Image: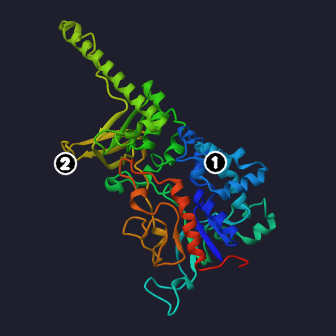
């Protein structure tokens, strides 16, 4: 039984462990094993890597995974994992996922190419095989491989061989090539973190958002943390789109610069009040308490500055005219961070002769606003409006996706009309999608782990275990 798994995150690794134990020949398509958890830890994303996981050890790991690691270490399960404790992302990676990834690496074929599409070898979408299910025809996974540059250098080939090949031949060999593998079963475990939402209304692109000139100016999702932190000195003005958890964490990462007034932060959200949804869980999360305290401190600081300004302004107005000419008018304080609530980002522009980015925002009258348009100039933009499922790779399959969201007929990831194809991870609208504030309900790792047995049982309804 040959099985292809798309994605290299925790669920892909856990699924691989179960399937290799059954005797299946498993291939994983992913640049690296560990997914975004690896990025959180290896890039040392400050608040992110120390953040607690969404569950205890017993909820975010499997018995099979813990047994593999305890057997390798020669220690008891209790010595390695106190299953009732909740680890940080860093602890989860170092203690569990990293060593489990290394173990799985030896058991599977790891293909680092980029998957382009998945389809049946021959079957059309509306075609059936008389007397058989569509599973009779294999799945084809098409992927792109970038050749290793060192393979065509003097490090690996002598000069005589290089000269005999010629530049045209060598350049053609360096061109990325489409390749394919065929499988009995395909499991999509790519998740959502690789598909952050855009900044525009309904999570679509704002005007000019796809412009190449904005490539080094606008960042999305967790890539914002990787690209912006630690913050460079030349970033004086930052615009954040969205007011969910990620936006709050980014704010806390730059709070020292905000307090020193060495950076101006503007935050755009469709919420009536920034962070109003996530702060409802204030008592449950230490991060949210820290965020709430910071926002309250900023309110107090602004009010003190405003009071001082009003006093100074009155004193300045009472001066004689000849004194007013010598003493500048007191400067009105500005809020930092400045919140633009009830607004959508509708356009983003980069002028040829200016380094700044200009974000145009609009508010809607049905939100109780005046239908105004504002333009914010900034050095960088962090788009943190949440994530959404993408099914563009699977247009060649008879899968049960809705027009715009990765949904199956049930929450277990099965696709009855395309037997042998599974979605492991976010599968329904309620848990996999979030609103434009980025504050929707989170899909938890525990939810995906509960799918493993369901998918395994369904696979075994078509095949039998080795030795049976």
Image coordinates for residue 440, horizontal then vertical, percent: 39, 50
In the image, what residue occupies the spot 65% across and 75% down?
Answer: 2
How busy is the neighbourhood of tag 2: few (under 14 within 10 Å), some, or many (20 plus)?
few
Q: In this view, does 34 lie above or below 401?
A: above
> Dot 1: few (<14), some (14–19), or many (≥20) neighbours within 10 Å?
many
Residue 420 visible = yes
Residue 369, image x, y percentages: 20, 42
Picture quadrant of residue 174: bottom right
In the rendered image of this protein, does residue 388 appear above or below residue 166? above
Q: What x and y, as percent, mark residue 232?
A: 52, 35
Between the C-alphas of marks 2 and 1, the distance is 46 Å
Disc assigned to residue 130:
none
Res. 167 in view: no
* Residue shown at 45% from the left, 45% from the top: 217
**Looking at the figure, which quarter contains the C terminus?**
bottom right
Q: What element carries label 2?
A: helix
The image quadrant that residue 91 belongs to is top right
Residue where numbered disc 2 is placed = 366
Q: Is residue 358 left or right of residue 77?
A: left
- The correct choice, above or below, for 353 with respect to 133 in the image is above
Q: Are marks 2 and 1 in contact (CB under 8 Å)?
A: no
**Residue that carries the numbered disc 1 in the rendered image:** 93
What residue sits 47% from the left and 54% below the top? 443
Q: How many labels does the image show?
A: 2
The front one of 92 and 240 is: 92
């Amino acid at each position: 039984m040959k099985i292809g798994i798309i994605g290299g995150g925790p669920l892909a690794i856990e699924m691989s462990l179960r399937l290799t134990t059954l005797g299946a020949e498993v291939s994983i398509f992913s640049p690296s094993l560990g997914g975004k958890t690896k990025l959180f830890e290896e890039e040392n994303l400050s608040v992110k890597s120390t953040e607690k996981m969404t569950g205890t050890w017993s909820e975010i790991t499997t018995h099979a995974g813990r047994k593999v690691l305890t057997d390798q270490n020669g220690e008891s399960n209790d010595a390695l994992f106190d299953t009732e404790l909740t680890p940080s992302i860093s602890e989860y990676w170092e203690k569990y996922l990293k060593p489990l990834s290394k173990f799985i690496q030896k058991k599977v074929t790891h293909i680092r190419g980029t998957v382009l599409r998945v389809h049946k070898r021959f079957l059309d979408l509306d075609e059936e095989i008389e007397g058989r299910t569509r599973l009779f025809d294999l799945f084809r996974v098409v992927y792109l491989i970038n050749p290793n540059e060192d393979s065509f250098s003097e490090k690996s080939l002598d000069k005589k061989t290089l000269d005999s090949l010629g530049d045209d031949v060598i350049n053609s060999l360096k061109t990325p090539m489409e390749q394919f593998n065929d499988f009995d079963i395909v499991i999509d475990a790519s998740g959502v973190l690789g598909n952050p939402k855009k900044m525009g209304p309904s999570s679509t692109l704002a005007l000019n958002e796809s412009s190449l000139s904005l490539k080094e100016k606008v960042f999305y999702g967790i890539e914002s943390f990787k690209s912006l932190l630690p913050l460079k000195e030349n970033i004086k003005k930052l615009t954040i789109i969205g007011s969910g958890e990620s936006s709050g964490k980014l704010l806390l990462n730059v709070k020292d610069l905000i307090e020193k007034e060495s950076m101006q932060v503007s935050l755009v959200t469709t919420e009536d009040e920034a962070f109003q949804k996530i702060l409802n869980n204030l008592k449950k999360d230490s991060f949210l308490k820290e965020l709430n305290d910071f926002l309250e401190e900023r309110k107090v600081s602004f009010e003190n500055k405003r009071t001082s300004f009003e006093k100074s302004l009155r004193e300045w107005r009472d001066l004689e005219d000849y004194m007013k000419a010598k003493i500048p008018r007191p400067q009105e304080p500005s809020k930092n961070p400045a919140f633009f609530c009830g607004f959508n980002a509708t356009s983003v522009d980069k002028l040829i002769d200016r380094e700044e980015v200009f974000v145009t925002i609009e508010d809607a009258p049905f939100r109780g606003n005046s239908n105004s348009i504002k333009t914010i100039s900034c050095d960088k933009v962090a788009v943190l409006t949440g994530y959404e499922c993408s099914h563009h790779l699977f247009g060649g399959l008879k899968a049960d996706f809705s027009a715009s969201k990765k949904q199956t007929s049930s929450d277990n990831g099965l696709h009855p009309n395309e037997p042998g194809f599974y979605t492991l991870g976010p599968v329904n609208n309620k848990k996999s999608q979030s609103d434009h504030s980025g504050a929707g309900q989170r899909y938890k790792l525990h939810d995906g782990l509960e799918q493993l047995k369901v998918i395994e049982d369904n696979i075994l309804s078509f095949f039998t275990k080795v030795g049976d």
